[in-house]
Image (cartoon, grey):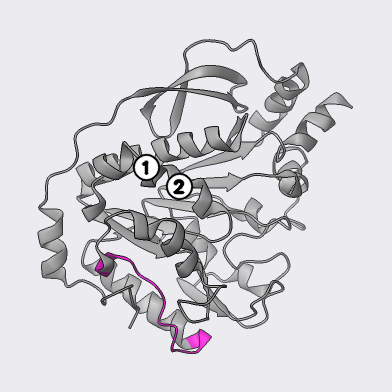
Amino acid sequence: MVSSALSSSPTAAAAAAILRRRPTPPLPRVFPIPLLRLSETLIAPRVAFPSPARLRQSSLNAMAFSAAAAAAAAAAATKGSKELIVFGSEEDLAVSLAKYTAELSEKFVRERGAFSVVLSGGSLIKSIRKLTESPYVESVDWSRWYVFWVDERVVPKDHVDSNYKLAYDGFLSKVPIPPGQVYAINDSLSPEGAADDYETCLKQLVKDGIIALSASSGFPRFDLMLLGMGPDGHIASLFPGHPLINEKERWVTFIKDSPKPPPERITFTFPVINSSAYIAMVVTGAGKASAVLKVFGSEESSADLLPVEMISLEDGALTWFTDKAATSMLVDKANM
């Protein structure tokens, strides 16, 4: 069975009891934050969130990016429905990401009585640290959260390479999510067994109504995926050129030859990722700039798509939370 920090999957009766609890009061709607929304070429020191998927301009900020950034923004806006937000600092990004996540939590708790959240590893956990601080640690209805991993290394939970350990140390241990609602892999199984077990768990939670089901794709529809991207453009444990990127049937699969150690992992497949309601793609640092340029600054070719370019939501919203370093090549290209 899929395991959690202290207990196994909740029963349907327990889940029903959880869903009867009252949601939190509405969160404040406006907060100060300098950012550039490239999809609309906006630079605003105050941003309102009338909905988690939309950002509204309230005033212009004279301390802005160069005109080259605006030119890059216009090019980015033609690349489809992807929304790209560039923050002046990692701190600003973390503040905005916490606001975005908390508002989605409020939305889904109100609408469904539960909030299904998928985490990744890497620097993502640091980026959500503001959720462990006031006002969110007090105001978010953590009792309605159900936490999953988009991928996991098949190692013990206390291993330095474990995504569970990373999330526990930096996030889960600091917020009151019930341990039985944190779904870690069974690390005593083989990669094949762990993937099968995790998929079985997800299917049961869909039956219990904890995870929604996409009517169009037939795959689980997670409320929010908080994802990162590798410098090579990989997401989850779906790497460029690897056969797993073409998996169309499984919800969860395994890999034994990951090009990035450790080699044995389990991972969600693209049909699951692309059935999400919301995805926040958190990408920072100059090491990711080349992949960001490929996504937003070059012509798409189906022959050489990076895994991150294969995100194509069935019916959802994809927002990129980035910094100036990660988008530096977009600006450089606009200056050429």
Helix, strand or loop for the magenta stretch, by majority: loop
Residue type at the position of mark 1: Glu
Tell me the tag on residue 196: none
The outermost residue toward the right is: 336
Tell me the tag on residue 129: 2
Tell me the tag on residue 133: 1
Residue 108: percent from left, percent from top? 27, 45
Is 158 above or below relative to 34?
Answer: below
Is 9 above or below relative to 76?
Answer: below
| Residue 259 shown left or right of residue 254 in the figure | right
Report the span colored magenta: 180-192
Note whether residue 316 is visible: no
**In magenta segment, residue 191:** yes
Residue type at the position of mark 2: Arg
Mark 1 residue element: loop
Note whether residue 152 is visible: yes
Residue 44: percent from left, percent from top? 54, 17
Residue 105: percent from left, percent from top? 31, 44
Mark 2 residue element: helix
